[in-house]
Amino acid sequence: MKRLATLSLFVAALAAGSACAGVKRPQAQTAPAHALERNVLLGACLAVGAPNDSAKASEILSHASTITPRAAFAGAMAEMLDKAAGLYDRRGLDLPEKLAMVQGRAKALRAVAEQVGPAMVVKVSGR
């Protein structure tokens, strides 16, 4: 909870323009959206087996559908769930039921990642 409160205060200070003299107010207001976009991009890179390589991931995802190794895809999803589980531990929101659920799903994905075969990634129309 303390970490979440600290992050909220930091974002609020950025939005107010007082946290850093080098950050302009419009930049501070769009910072959370840019951070979210970056994390989605890094997650997509991880899911197609190209960690931290946005150019390669973009090329792979430019097709209507693509085949990626099941281990890479399911492993990436499990890793993202493990990171998200931190929100629900004692230092975060302290919701043990949700923590157990997220950890259980991550464990199930790790079991899927051990199976041999591909995973198909399909482009979904959106904005």
Image (cartoon, rainbow, N blue to C red):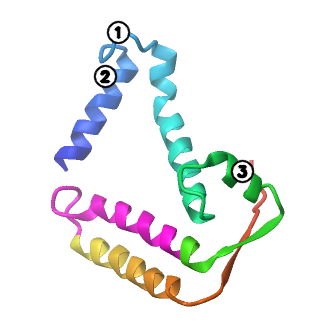
Residue 117 rendering spot, x and y as whole percentages: 65, 87
Residue 13's disc is 2
Residue 61 rendering spot, x and y as whole percentages: 74, 58
Judging depth in this view, the residue of 38 and 45 nearest the camera is: 45
Under mark 2, the amino acid is Ala
Query: Few, some or many C-alpha atoms within 10 Å of disc 3 (few <14, some 14-19, many ≥20)?
Result: some
Q: Are marks 1 and 3 in contact (CB under 8 Å)?
A: no
Q: Residue at x 44, y 72 (%)?
A: 78
**Mark 1 residue element:** loop
Disc 1: which residue: 21
Residue 58's disc is 3
Q: Which residues are magenta?
A: 74-95
Under mark 1, the amino acid is Ala
Q: Earlier in the sequence, mark 2 or mark 1?
A: 2
Q: Earlier in the sequence, mark 1 or mark 3?
A: 1
Q: Is residue 51 magenta?
A: no
**Mark 2 residue element:** helix
Q: Which quarter of the picture shows residue 87?
A: bottom left
